[in-house]
Amino acid sequence: MPLDAPPSGSMPYEEKALAFPCGDAWLVGVATLPGRPAARGVLVVVGGPQYRAGSHRQFTLLARALAEQGIPAMRFDVSGMGDSGGAARGFAHQEADIRAAIDAFMACAPGLREVVLWGLCDGASSAAMVAADDARVAGLVLLNPWVRTEESLAKATLKHYYRERLLAPDLWKKILRGRFELRAALASLLEQVRRALRPPAPAPDTAGAACGGSLPERMHDGLARFGGPVLLVLSGADLTAREFADLAAASPQWRQLLAAPRFTRHELAPADHTFSRRAWRDQVAAWTTDWVRSW
């Protein structure tokens, strides 16, 4: 029996495979429903080149952990990914996908009155940008949100990767043994410095008109307009999380936004980007469960 499976004969939830329309395409999802579901459920917004199970079955296991605590959950394949049809839209254009998934979630769980959008990486970014436009969305859980620009990546790489690399014993062993490509390393370092010092490029006219500016600006605008409670979870050993933390620390607008009482923030110091170890995964599930029940 799989480690994550409940004991035989004591299944506290059922899982329903769903197919639901989104424009001219059909999307596929799985709802995990407890026997006596709460009125608030969690919809997992999948980001990146992932499908509804997630890396190391991350989203499947999260949905089941929530359902064991009475919280209905749903995960689905966005357009053009996994088993869903249609063309891939990219995380910045998933409003229709998320709206259709909420429709399907509420239809299969009649007692559901509101949903929390739960997203990792650019799934978190997508959720942050669309939540304010659907009254059924009551809260957000954002893990390691993607706010990347060329400049932010360069700055985070210089601040976190290179500093930690200089303290790594294996680097100095390579240098002492003559196995370190100094010229290539210096070229890479100088390129990162050049990118970090480059003035931010203006957003393209079409993006600015449709979305309100750069990705960090659009996310800030979405979160400010949303106004509901937000749980923010950051990994300590993840460059994407460090980029977000650096942005939040450097920007007065972001500092003011995240200081509001409606934001709850947790950091899991040893965790990687996808919380790949069982202890990290269980901690995220516990934080999510407690937070969803707390308001």
Image (cartoon, rainbow, N blue to C red):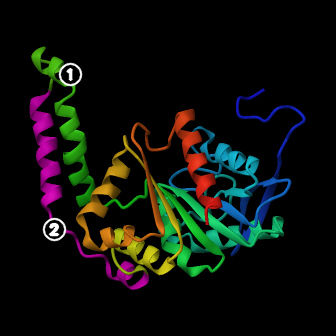
Judge by depth and name the residue closer to the eye, 26 or 55.
55
- Few, some or many residues within 10 Å of mark 1 (<14, 14–19, 20+): few
- Residue occupying the far top of the picture: 177
- Residue occupying the far bottom of the picture: 209
**With 164 as the anchor, is 110 left or right in this view?**
right
Does residue 90 appear anywhere in the picture? no
What residue did someone put label 1 on? Answer: 169
Magenta-highlighted residues: 181-210
First in sequence: mark 1 or mark 2?
Answer: 1
What residue did someone put label 2 on? Answer: 199
**Residue at the image point whose x is 35% and y is 81% from the top:** 208
Q: Position of residue 3 (x, y in %)?
A: 71, 29
Judge by depth and name the residue closer to the eye, 165 or 259.
259
Does residue 282 appear anywhere in the picture? yes
**Residue at the image point whose x is 37% and y is 43% from the top:** 236
**Residue 68 part of the magenta segment:** no
Number of the label disc, if any, that sits on residue 112: none
Image height of 243 relative to 22, above or below: above
Q: Position of residue 116 (x, y in %)?
A: 62, 65
Q: Main secondary structure of the magenta part?
A: helix
**With 110 as the anchor, is 228 left or right in this view?**
left
